[in-house]
Image (spheres, rainbow, N blue to C red):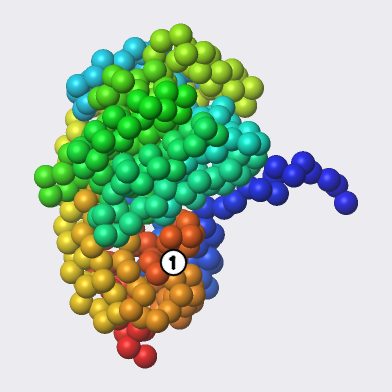
């Protein structure tokens, strides 16, 4: 038998893709499946973005680009960052990558090794823990609690830092909970991090514009005290409905320390993916510089769907759901049903034709919850809610 290095045995999964595959297989068998499992907008990429990619191909942009991305695109990301955060960043601190995960991959590889500790949100995006374990570092869960509105607690987070802590991963607005951490809590965290100058921070801000009810996203870029050890993850997948384009960006620390990290991720790009494909980068440029009315339209639709989901879930016996403040996920508490989360999610798919994700797929603290993505039509959401209620009444 061929032997592989042990690190590969430590790689985990993103079970949303497994659920997507099973839901697709059932649909191919003729089953009527409502998929609220995958975090993918049901909208098409706006037409002007698609047209920009087509034009790039027609204009002959078929070759390699710089490993860190086209300068024009990095300049556009810098403009967008200034507009959304009020912070000026240099295009020379921006990396263009094939999606959001490569930033996680690079940052966690840089700081993860045996005897190191990396803090990550639980429940949270499953790839955080998977990559931490891949590096041999010890994953340390930062509890994300329903009673806090699924925002992280600065006090609880800071208490978990030890001399072995190398990296802290944060995510707001958050997957899978839809939680948004208030500015006051982030202020407390940043103040506390002054006592831990050797801890780097990876802030996953992929859902930055997806907030509701007057909530405002607070970017960690707005705190100069941590700028020299801050990595910010963002991208095109969610905001512009470009999941399949595989296009993301990250902003790396400033100063001597930051330049060193930036060069490391550039070298990683050269050694692994070389560069992001050229037409996708021209599409990304059109997304940032073009009209944003389709983004606003999507956000209005998500907000309407969010209200339907929360109202519908809270009307089902045994289920309660706090109102998510961001992203396009609800994370209802299903403990009142008396069922285990993954078992319930599996039964709903196989027997009721509704695809959800069990909370434990996002961490140990996910038991008692399931994740619903409301990146689907109102009609399908209402059908799913009816099926869930009917199933639980049986």
Where disc 1 sits, the SS reads loop
**Vertical arrangement, residue 61 with respect to residue 306, above or below:** above
Query: Along the horizontal axis of the image, is 295 left or right of 117?
Result: left
Of residues 141 and 350, the one drawn nearer to the viewer in this rendering: 141
Query: x, y (%) of residue 258?
Result: 45, 15
**Which residue sits furthest right?**
1
Is 184 placed above or below 249 here? below
Which quadrant holds residue 348?
bottom left
On screen, residue 279 above or below 186: above
Task: Identify the residue position indicated by label 1 in the image.
Answer: 367
Left-right relation of 370 to 262: left
- Residue 150 found in image quarter: bottom left
The image shows residue 39 at horizontal and vertical percentages of 38, 52
Frontmost residue, 72 versus 215? 215
At 47% across and 13% down in the image, what residue appears?
Answer: 257
How many residues crowd mark 1 within 10 Å: few (<14), some (14–19), many (20+)?
A: some
Is residue 56 something that shows in the picture?
no
How many numbered marks, from 0 up?
A: 1
Q: Nearer the viewer, residue 59 or 210?
A: 210
Name the quarter where the C terminus is drawn. bottom left
Residue sitting nearer the eye, 61 or 381:
381
Asked whether residue 37 appears in the rendered view, the answer is yes
Question: Whole-percent x and y of residue 262?
Answer: 49, 17
Residue at the spot 24% in from the left edge and 40% down from the top edge: 185
The residue positioned 17% from the left and 48% from the top of the image is 212
């Amino acid at each position: 038998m061929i032997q592989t290095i042990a690190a590969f045995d430590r790689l985990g999964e993103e079970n949303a893709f497994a659920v997507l595959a099973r839901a697709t297989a059932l649909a191919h068998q003729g089953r009527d499946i409502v998929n609220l499992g995958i975090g993918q907008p049901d909208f098409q990429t706006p037409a002007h973005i698609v047209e920009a990619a087509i034009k790039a191909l027609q204009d002959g942009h078929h070759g390699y680009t710089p490993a860190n991305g086209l300068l024009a695109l990095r300049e556009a990301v810098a403009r967008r960052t200034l507009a959304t955060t009020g912070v000026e960043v240099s295009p020379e601190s921006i990396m263009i990558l094939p999606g959001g995960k490569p930033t996680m991959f690079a940052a966690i590889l840089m700081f993860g090794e045996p005897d190191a500790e990396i803090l990550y949100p639980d429940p949270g995006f499953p790839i955080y823990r998977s990559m931490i374990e891949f590096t041999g570092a010890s994953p340390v869960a930062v509890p994300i609690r329903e009673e806090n509105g699924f925002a992280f607690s600065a006090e609880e987070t800071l208490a978990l830092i030890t001399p072995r802590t190398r990296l802290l991963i944060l995510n707001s607005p958050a997957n899978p909970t839809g939680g948004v951490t208030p500015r006051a809590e982030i202020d407390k965290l940043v103040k506390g991090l002054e006592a831990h100058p050797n801890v780097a921070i990876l802030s996953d801000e992929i859902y930055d514009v997806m907030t509701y009810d007057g909530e405002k996203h607070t970017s960690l870029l707005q705190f100069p005290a941590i700028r020299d050890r801050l990595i910010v993850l963002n991208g095109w997948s969610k905001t512009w409905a470009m999941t399949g384009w595989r296009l993301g960006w990250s902003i790396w620390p400033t100063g001597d320390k930051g330049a060193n990290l930036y060069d490391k991720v550039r070298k990683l790009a050269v050694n692994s993916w070389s560069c992001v494909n050229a037409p996708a980068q021209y599409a990304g440029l059109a997304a940032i510089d073009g009209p944003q009315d389709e983004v606003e339209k999507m956000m209005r639709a998500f907000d309407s769907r969010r209200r339907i989901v929360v109202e519908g879930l809270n009307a089902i016996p045994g289920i309660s759901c706090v109102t998510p403040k961001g992203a396009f996920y609800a994370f209802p508490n299903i403990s009142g049903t008396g069922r285990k989360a993954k078992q319930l999610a599996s039964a709903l798919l196989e027997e009721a034709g509704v695809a959800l994700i069990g909370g434990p797929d996002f961490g140990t603290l996910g038991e008692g919850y399931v994740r619903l993505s409301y990146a689907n039509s109102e009609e399908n959401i209402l059908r799913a809610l009816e099926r869930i209620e009917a199933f639980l009444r049986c």
